[in-house]
């Protein structure tokens, strides 16, 4: 067999095809022999099966015909489907914990991720309806309408009927390249609404492949813990559920950012190439533009002298101009221009997990009860604005204090603060900076917090499904309780392992 790259255990692409295939198969077979990998596959299979429930199936979904033909459209089936999803999430978290660094070192993380992802490849969108919106926006483009100016409700029919009602009457907030990719998937799907939606998984999978392949290699170049990066980032249950299962365009954005960081670390003087890739990533989703700054600083050791500081500032300016220029060129080439600016507030129009959004909604409800609804709305809006301002100030502070020595750390923490203090926050928003977290040399405490947040967000996803499925919150709370139990066991075992070192 040909030579194997030991970084993340991925065979080098330069091997002969037959030997490469044999190596891949060997890696998959080795991973399959690990009991926790089988447990994770069972989890994602149950997750795919449980996703065929009313909470996440639009009324015009082709799945309804066989479900109703089998007599499965009833309350009992809802409970069973919800229970399957809750069990799946608990099993997946447990399997993930069992593969943590220090327990197994003889498997390849990419192989584990592939095995776990298989049941999700043909499943409906998991825990989110966003992929249906992508398809409907691609349908608008196919009919000569601009999704930045026209909500999907303008074209009533199968595409619009798939979209969650709250997003049927809003313009698209995504980058122009993302919309054109959606159009391409609609064409590839033969203009079929459901098939087009499933094909949205293709660009998401491209992003996931970029993450899985390049992130451990970037960790190796940074001298950080490759095993931690591979475990926390490439087989993270949130990555599987939100990016593979949910098909979010964040996957492609993150993958391109990681590619840009990796290529720049290989050849710091060619930072312009990284900046170009960042511009492409921003055309998928606009927050990628922030990566233009750290890309410029990679490979420049900090020195306190005027010439060095000016050199860094010049590179940062050049990188930013290149990234913005690429973004502008793509926007003009697609014919969509900058209409996304009209929809910049769309994500914040609903209450999400964003701390300030939750706080503002709580204050608003109290004010309504007290007879001051207008005051409550004003306070809630002011909190969202304050969060945006605070996150901008924090990013500026990190740009001055952290980025000059640790550009990737700056990017990771900046994205996390932007997600936490933004007007809207979903679990996949935390992946922007969260997947980069192992590259920052996180302390033991930060690692624990990251594991807890990941696990709780998974529990929230299962609980939200129970609520939307009209099965009550009992099953969701039971799942969250089991996840907390797993966390306690994980930290106990982690502490015991540390004591025996």
Image: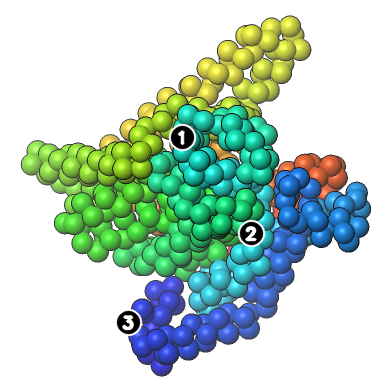
Q: Which residue is mark 1?
A: 146
| Image spot of residue 299 (x, y percent) | 21, 55
Location of residue 133 in the rendering, given as x and y in whole percent from the top left corner: 58, 42
SS class, disc 3: loop
Can I make out residue 342 in this image?
Answer: yes
**Precedes in sequence: disc 1 or disc 2:** 1
Residue 462 rendering spot, x and y as whole percentages:
73, 50
Earlier in the chain: of badge 3 and badge 1, it is 3
Q: Secondary structure at mark 1?
A: loop
- Indicate which label's residue lies in the foreground, 1 or 2: 1
Question: Residue at left 62%, top 69%?
Answer: 118
Q: CA distance from mark 1 to mark 2?
A: 51 Å
Q: Furthest residue to the bottom?
A: 1
Q: Is residue 249 visible?
A: no
Report the residue at 52% width, 85% height from top: 25
- The answer to which of marks 3 and 2 sits earlier in the sequence is 3
């Amino acid at each position: 067999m040909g030579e194997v790259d030991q970084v993340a255990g991925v065979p080098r692409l330069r091997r002969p095809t037959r030997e490469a295939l044999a190596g891949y198969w060997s890696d998959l077979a080795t991973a399959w022999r690990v009991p926790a990998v089988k447990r994770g596959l069972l989890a994602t299979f149950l997750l795919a099966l449980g996703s065929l429930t009313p909470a996440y199936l639009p009324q015009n979904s082709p799945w309804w015909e066989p479900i109703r033909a089998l007599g499965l459209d009833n309350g009992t089936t809802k409970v069973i489907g919800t229970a399957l999803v809750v069990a799946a999430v608990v099993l997946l978290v447990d399997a993930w914990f069992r593969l943590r660094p220090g327990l197994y070192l003889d498997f390849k993380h990419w192989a584990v991720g592939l095995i776990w992802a298989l049941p999700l490849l043909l499943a409906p969108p998991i825990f989110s309806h966003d992929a249906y919106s992508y398809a409907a926006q691609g349908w608008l483009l196919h009919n000569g309408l601009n999704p930045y100016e026209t909500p999907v409700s303008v074209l009533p029919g199968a595409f619009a009927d798939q979209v969650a009602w709250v997003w049927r009457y809003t313009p698209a907030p995504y980058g122009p390249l993302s919309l054109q990719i959606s159009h391409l998937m609609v064409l590839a799907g033969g203009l079929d609404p459901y098939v087009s939606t499933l094909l949205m998984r293709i660009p998401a999978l491209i992003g996931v492949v970029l993450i899985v392949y390049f992130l451990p290699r970037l960790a190796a170049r940074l001298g950080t813990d490759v095993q931690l990066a591979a475990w926390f980032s490439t087989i993270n249950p949130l990555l599987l559920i939100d990016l593979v299962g949910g098909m979010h365009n964040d996957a492609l954005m993150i993958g391109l950012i990681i590619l840009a960081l990796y290529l720049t670390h290989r050849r710091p003087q060619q930072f312009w190439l990284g900046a170009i890739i960042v511009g492409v990533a921003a055309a998928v989703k606009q927050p990628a533009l922030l990566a233009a700054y750290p890309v410029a600083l990679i490979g420049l050791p900090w020195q306190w002298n005027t010439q060095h500081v000016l050199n860094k500032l010049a590179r940062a300016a050049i990188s930013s101009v290149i990234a913005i220029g690429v973004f502008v060129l793509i926007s003009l080439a697609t014919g969509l221009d900058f209409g996304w600016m009209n929809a910049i507030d769309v994500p914040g129009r609903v209450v999400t997990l964003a701390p300030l959004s939750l706080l503002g909604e709580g204050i608003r409800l109290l004010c309504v009860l007290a007879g001051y609804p207008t005051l409550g709305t004003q306070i809630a809006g002011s909190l969202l604005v304050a969060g945006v301002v605070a996150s901008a100030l924090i990013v500026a502070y990190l740009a001055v204090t952290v980025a000059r020595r640790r550009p990737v750390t700056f990017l990771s923490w900046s994205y996390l603060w932007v997600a936490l203090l933004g007007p809207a926050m979903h679990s996949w928003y935390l992946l922007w900076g969260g997947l980069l977290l192992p590259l920052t040399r996180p302390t033991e405490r930060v690692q624990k917090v990251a594991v807890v947040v990941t696990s709780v967000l998974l529990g929230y996803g299962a609980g939200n499904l129970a609520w939307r499925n009209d099965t009550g919150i009992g099953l969701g709370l039971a799942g969250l309780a089991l996840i907390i139990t797993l966390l306690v066991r994980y930290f106990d075992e982690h502490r015991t392992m540390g004591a025996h070192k």
